[in-house]
Image: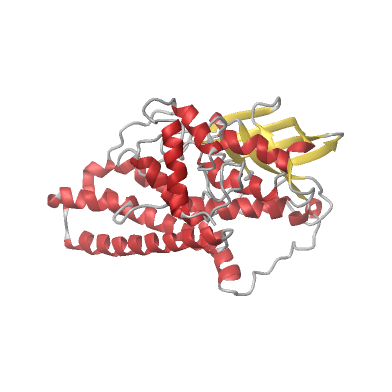
Amino acid sequence: MTTAEDLKGRVADLLAAYPPESTPRQDFLDARFDAGLAWIHFPEGLGGLGAPRSLQSVVDKELAAAGAPDNDKRRIGIGLGMAAPTILAFGTPEQHQRFLRPLWTEREVWCQLFSEPGAGSDLAALGTRAVRDGDDWVVTGQKVWTSGAHKSQWAILVTRTDPDVPKHRGMTYFLCDMTAPGVEVRPLRQITGEAEFNEVFLSEVRIPDAHRLGAVGEGWKVAQTTLMNERVAIGGTEFPRDGGMVGVVAETWRERPELRTSDLHDRLLKLWVEGESLRLVSARLRQQLAAGAPGPEGSAVKVAFSELNQAASGLEVELLGDEGLRYDDWTMRRPDGVNFLGREAGYRYLRAKGNSIEGGTSEVLRNIIAERVLGLPSEPRIDKDVAWKDLPR
C-alpha cells in the first residue's frame, strides 16, 4: 500500500532529477507522468501508481511548494475530467497507451461531441449516424454546444449505430480525430460576446474501429460514465472557504461599504451559508469519489452549484448598482478555457446563466436525483420500447 511518505519520497526524487527552475515545462510534465505522479490512482504505466485517490493532494502540495509547473486544468478540463476516466474504464490497453499520456501532458486537447439540435436534454434521442465500412465507421451528423472544439485535437463522440432498436440501445461511443476530413467547427456566439461554444458538422468522417470505446450498441453505458464524471468536474470543484462566486461578492461587500443595505446584507449572508454548505458537500463528494466511481450524487452538487452561481452573480450586479450594468468588451473572441469568475460583474452574471444548462440541465438532473438518489418512481416513458426510427421528430 502506497503511503503519504512514499509519495513524498517519489516527489523528492522527481524534483532532484528535474529541477523546476531549470527544466522546460513540457519536459517536467512528461517526467511527472512517467513517474506515476500525474493521477496517482491510475494504474502504473498510465501516469499513476494504483494508489488511493485521496493521497493526490499530498503530491500536489509538495510540487506546488517547490514551484513545479502543472498542467492547465482550464484548458484541458474536458480531457481530464471526462475523457480520461472514460478511456480508462472502457478503453483497450492500446487506447490507454495512445491517449492518456498526451492528454494529461497537454499535448492533445479534448472536447465532447454529445448534444445535438434535437437531442440536448434527451441525449439518447441523438441522430448522428455511424455506419460500418470495413475497418472504419463513416459518421454523419451535427453536434452543438461543444465547448473548446475550436482548439481540440480529439473528441469523445456518441453516435447512432442501430436505428431499429430503442434509443438507449442503439448507440456507440467513439474517439474522434477533430482534424480528420469532414469535421467542420463553427463558432456559436453567446450572450457574453464570446464564442466559447461551437457547433460541429460531421460529413462522412471516417473513424477506425480501433477508436471505438466499448462495445457496439453500448454507447449509452459508456456515456453515463462520462456524464457522471462531468457533473463532478463542474459542481465538485475544490475551492477554499469564502471562495467561488460568493467569495467574489463578499470581497466587494467588504471593500465597498457605501454600497451596503440591510436587505443585501441578509441575502449575502444566506448565500454565504449556502456556499459553505456546498463547499463541505463537495468535499464529501470528492471523498466518495476517492473511494470509487462517481455516482448520481454528483447531480445534486451540480444543481446546487448552478443555482448558487446564478444567485450570487445576480446579487453582485444589484450590489454595484449602475456600475454593475457596465460591460467591458463585447468583442467576439474564442477563449482557450472557461473561467466562471473571470472579468467583471456583468460578465459573471451573464456567464452564470449557462451553468444550469451545461453538464446536464437542472431539470434533467432533478429527475436523476429523484429517481436514483431518493428512489422515487420514474416518470412515465412512452418511448421505452419503441425503435428510434419510429420516434416522432
Residue 61 visible to the viewer:
yes
Compared across the picture, whether 386 is left or right of 193 comes to right
**Residue 250 in the image: x percent, y percent?**
24, 53
Residue at the image position 57 percent from the left and 46 percent from the top: 82
Q: Position of residue 141 (x, y in %)?
A: 71, 37
Q: Residue at x 57, y 36 (%)?
A: 103
Say left or right for 107 vs 123: left
Give the x, y percent position of residue 74: 45, 39
* Image coords of residue 262 (percent x, y): 17, 62
Q: Is residue 384 above or below residue 17?
A: below
Q: Quadrant of residue 277?
A: bottom left
Q: As displayed, is residue 12 above or below residue 224?
A: above
Q: Is residue 122 visible?
A: no
Q: Toward the viewer: 301 or 70?
A: 70
In front: 32, or 294?
32
Check the image and report above or below for 140 versus 302.
above
Q: Residue at x 48, y 36 (%)?
A: 75
Count numbered badges in the picture. 0
